Image (cartoon, coloured by chain):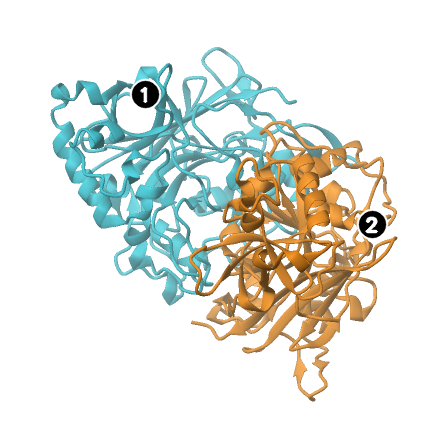
Chain colours: A cyan, B orange
Amino acid sequence: MRSSGTEFGLNHLPYGVFSTKGDQQGHRLGVAIGDQIADLASLASAGLLDDPTGALSSSTLNRFMTEGPSRWAEVRAQLTALLADTSKLGAHLVAQSSARMHLAWDVADYVDFYSSLDHATNVGKMFRPDADALLPNWKHLPVGYHGRAGTVVVSGTDIVRPSGQRKGPNDPMPVFGASARLDIEAEVGFVVGVPSQQGSPVPTTAFADHVFGVVLVNDWSARDIQAWEYQPLGPFLGKSFATSVSAWVTPLAALAGARCSPPAQDPAVLPYLVDADPWSLDLRLSVELNGEEVSAPPFSTMYWTPGQQLAHMTINGASLRTGDLFASGTVSGPTKHERGSFLELSWGGTEPLTFADGSTRTFLLDGDQITISALAQTANGEPIHLGPVSGVIQSTY
Amino acid sequence: MRSSGTEFGLNHLPYGVFSTKGDQQGHRLGVAIGDQIADLASLASAGLLDDPTGALSSSTLNRFMTEGPSRWAEVRAQLTALLADTSKLGAHLVAQSSARMHLAWDVADYVDFYSSLDHATNVGKMFRPDADALLPNWKHLPVGYHGRAGTVVVSGTDIVRPSGQRKGPNDPMPVFGASARLDIEAEVGFVVGVPSQQGSPVPTTAFADHVFGVVLVNDWSARDIQAWEYQPLGPFLGKSFATSVSAWVTPLAALAGARCSPPAQDPAVLPYLVDADPWSLDLRLSVELNGEEVSAPPFSTMYWTPGQQLAHMTINGASLRTGDLFASGTVSGPTKHERGSFLELSWGGTEPLTFADGSTRTFLLDGDQITISALAQTANGEPIHLGPVSGVIQSTY
């Protein structure tokens, strides 16, 4: 599977923020087409794209995302017509190879769920071998927590190995040092465009009124730091050093043809989590270590759906803001090659993976590059390539 | 203890954001003096206050907070001289009684710690009666987690009772409904001004290079929602519906005279948590329900100090942003009247509190007003009144 971002068809049209060396225009919005980027401010100022509010000429997606689904559809329709023939758009196109990509939006709050049955079961078996793998709440609500929004970085950003406290079961006292169990979590993230009011839950049916698009997420995790710190208030420093997201944000509309039925849920969920028309996405992720695929997690197996996650996240009256990111949690399928973390792939470090060059891995080494991409199977045509989200591990400070 | 904010002396000079009805000036920065607010943009435009960057004329504290400690000291010195005699400043003063207060800054990330030994011990005894009250990590690191920044609200904002899932130990299945165990957490919060770089920890000694000021915090908590959801990833919807902060941000400099020694720590902490000159604050909080004091938690008893919290939060390389808020966790002292939550005051709902009007409470009722204020005892003079942070419970949606 490809790990570069150069094959964007007319059925995709993802948004990003880019700059080019040597010009004075700074960060600006673009839409990927083929191996080019269409410069939205440039198209708007030439009168080729309507931009009545100036939102398409700003330096992040936030203002445009706030404008809502009818405006998103309008711009998508205009771009679809415009980019069908790029031969006359030369002045408004920039080669992806000569652009630098930036974080496409200002992240407001970042919530991470834990919605894969296989992932939660694998982790439960490893961490609580003598008990039920799933905790009692897991099938009643999509378990989640807040992560650190300020350390969400764009694909391509180097990841500095974190240091911190850890304490193995046989250590008498905690020790300090670089994480020795640095891991990934391959996830799918959803970006909120339209805010909601504090005190007003957002039902499953209002998903498309609020959510703008989809990114791939790598929720880097230091398992040794996490294991020592996480009780009773959950993950903190084991996660907060960095979370990578793809530079390209796929509009929800592009994935309409990739909707599929989610797995059945048993026991039945409470009414606020019932979706009259439940949907998941037929997305197959690909995780590569230094260019070699280690896993192909299937998003369609996720137990809790994006609509249920949004409804749950707001059922207490918590408001949404433009730029909120909520991610699925590690995507893992039932087979070994579908696991979305090295924790699971190496079964807690006990089963090293072997690579073509003969090297082995349990967790990540300095210099390792991880790239996550995804293929959306659409019912009616060309597949859509999401991502990539990529990062290289640098040695600790 | 007072619960209005009308006694601000020249030794305090807290910052806030206010507006007044009927004028066109919108949100603007002010500093409290007596029962007045000095309008900073007005002082600057009259040439009475230096504002070379325009930061003092913006609509939140963020730009000024980014400018750093030498600039903060300069402005404080100018204001101290200027406000010593307010008799000639009439045009630049607004009565607090005619102003509306707003959230003083854009909150970036919100981290909540769990740093009171008495609070953690009380909660541990209630939730794990057959085990050690403190978990093994508690005395080795300041346990904390990320909360929802988007639902931080200013004092005076009504709090809508959240609904959600809960499941008592004898319920066969979870049920949905309004929280029946709505609680407070009386805390002290620290607001970050100067950002740091991702990958570069901030040592205890750099506290004053980054932290701008102090607010009082009420981390509203739905104990029944929290108890059912919180394993294994920590608090989520039980907390994320609302967190209230005081309208007035006390500059760190105002509390220099209120520093005191923190409790001794045993066992010894790892080197990155050692502070060569450890300090806490001699702050006595006061929690009032409908005007009647229910608790007077002493901040000076907190086991982990603000400097240690900051060092811990960044030791994994997580960066700080302007506007980050980190709060102490519930402040509870060793005696019953020093407990900072109704969970502890009513011992899990088993020991109702009785009020002067004969009514009783375990947790909060609709219509209840909670007000938290604090008195800082300074070594050399007048005490400083922090807060208040106040909110009234509204019935659920």
Give the answer, above or below, for where B103 lies relative to B202: below
Q: Nearer the viewer, residue A73 or B130?
A: A73
- Is A202 on the left-hand or right-hand side of B396? left
Residue B220: image x %, image y %? 59, 63
Q: Chain of mark 1?
A: A
What chain is tagged by disc 2?
Answer: B
The label on residue B257 is 2
Residue A315 placement: quadrant: bottom left
Number of the front mark, 1 or 2: 2
In which quadrant of the rendered image does the C terminus of chain A lie? top right
Q: Quadrant of residue B277?
A: top right
* Side (left or right) of A290 relative to B284: left
Residue A44 placement: quadrant: top left
Residue B212 rendering spot, x and y as whole percentages: 66, 43
Circle 2: residue type: Gly
What residue would you read off at disc 1?
Answer: A2
Q: Amino acid at mark 1?
A: Arg
